[in-house]
Image: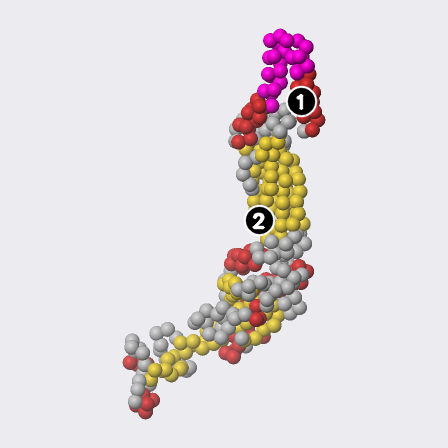
């Protein structure tokens, strides 16, 4: 661009000198034409510029340590020629806080140009790639003209598969993985609880013998075994290498529970405020959605532990099975 500006400056100087020494209409016409050339160049470049757009698309999630790829696409929606486009991209890992940038060039052919952008993904996280700026030169190459719109895309750098044994508490009888809850509609059963009569309770559920002794109605409420709610927690802070191990174990344990047909919750605390985030996981899709939210929050070197906060337990779930995942192991037990 600099050499074109120098060339234009020399041409303009020559036109001025021509006007000074040759005071005829031709010299005046030449000077006016040279002065108006940049304006005409910009005006002729605008239709192609306004009829073009940039789009960024991810090429799918990747396992950490792999190569993440985004596709940068330039589309021209009219027949006006478009010079090469210079694009400045910025990227970041929202979990680790890593950032970077690069510059690339696109040359439209047949109305379209595509370029694959490779990015390294050494750690777990949500990789976001965005167009910071994009511009083309006018037809004379004197002025940079910005391309309208800002493209942006994201993908996940996912945990690697890990070997996590099933916690003993999941295989235990009622003291571990199963709790007794009231059976909807009542009915016969070996386990039951006693409580005061409430309007609407069926007469067959009244414990008449005990009611006569207490001089008030007592109801036998049938209980049935139900699986306890499983809650997985982790601390959302630490060095990236340690968090990688945590998420490897967390994702492996979550998938192990899904294979066993156990829905569960994943919870973590905001490192600064301590606010607890709770996500229910009942499928691979909801697990990825949970990781997407977690990876969107930056993890500082230190912060508040989820163990210092109260778990979010559904009101009817009863005592949960709580497993805290660290980089070294999975600590299990009822809380």
Residue closest to the far bottom = 213
Q: Is residue 309 visible?
A: yes
Farthest top residue?
Answer: 24
Instruction: Please report whichever mark, 2 or 1, sits nearer to the chain's N-terminal start.
Output: 1
- Spatial CA distance of label 2 from label 1 is 43 Å
- Main secondary structure type of the part rendered in magenta: helix
Q: Residues within 10 Å of mark 2 (few under 14, many from 20)?
A: many
**Can residue 167 be found in the magenta stretch?**
no
Residue 190: % across, % down: 41, 82
Q: Which residue is mark 2?
A: 154
Range of the magenta residues?
15-38
Q: How many marks?
A: 2
Q: Residue at x 61, y 59 (%)?
A: 299
Q: Residues within 10 Å of mark 1 (few under 14, many from 20)?
A: some
Q: Which residue is mark 1?
A: 8
Please name the residue shown 51% across and 58% down the image.
286
Residue 248 seen from this side:
no
In the rendered structure, are the residues bearing label 2 and label 1 in contact, judged by CB atoms less than 8 Å apart? no
User: Residue 133 appears at what percent x and percent y?
Assistant: 60, 39
The secondary element bearing badge 1 is classed as helix
């Amino acid at each position: 661009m600099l050499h074109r500006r120098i060339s234009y400056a020399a041409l303009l100087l020559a036109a001025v000198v021509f006007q000074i020494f040759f005071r005829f209409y031709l010299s005046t016409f030449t000077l006016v034409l040279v002065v108006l050339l940049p304006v005409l160049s910009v005006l002729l470049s605008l239709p192609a510029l306004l009829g073009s757009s940039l789009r960024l698309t991810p090429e799918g999630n990747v396992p950490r340590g792999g190569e993440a790829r985004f596709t940068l696409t330039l589309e021209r929606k009219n027949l006006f020629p478009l010079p090469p486009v210079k694009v400045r991209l910025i990227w970041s890992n929202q979990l680790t806080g890593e950032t970077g940038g690069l510059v690339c060039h696109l040359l439209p052919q047949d109305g379209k140009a595509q370029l694959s952008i490779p990015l390294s993904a050494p750690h777990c996280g949500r990789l976001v790639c965005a167009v910071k700026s994009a511009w083309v030169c006018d037809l004379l190459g004197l002025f940079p003209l910005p391309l309208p719109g800002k493209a942006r895309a994201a993908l996940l750098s996912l945990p690697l598969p890990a070997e996590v044994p099933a916690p003993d508490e999941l295989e235990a009888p009622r003291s571990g993985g199963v709790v007794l809850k009231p059976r909807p509609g009542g009915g016969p059963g070996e386990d039951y609880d006693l409580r005061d009569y409430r309007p609407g309770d069926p007469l067959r559920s009244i414990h008449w013998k005990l009611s006569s002794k207490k001089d008030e109605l007592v109801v036998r409420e049938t209980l049935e075994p139900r699986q306890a709610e499983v809650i997985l927690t982790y601390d959302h802070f630490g060095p990236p290498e340690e968090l990688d191990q945590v998420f490897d174990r967390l994702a492996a344990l979550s998938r192990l529970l899904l294979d066993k047909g156990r829905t569960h919750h994943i919870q973590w605390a905001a490192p600064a405020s301590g606010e607890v985030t709770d996500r229910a996981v009942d499928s691979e899709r909801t697990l990825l959605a949970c990781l997407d939210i977690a990876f969107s929050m930056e993890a500082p070197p230190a912060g508040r532990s989820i163990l210092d906060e109260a778990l979010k337990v559904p009101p009817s779930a009863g005592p949960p099975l709580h497993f805290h995942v660290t980089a070294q192991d999975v600590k299990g037990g009822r809380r």
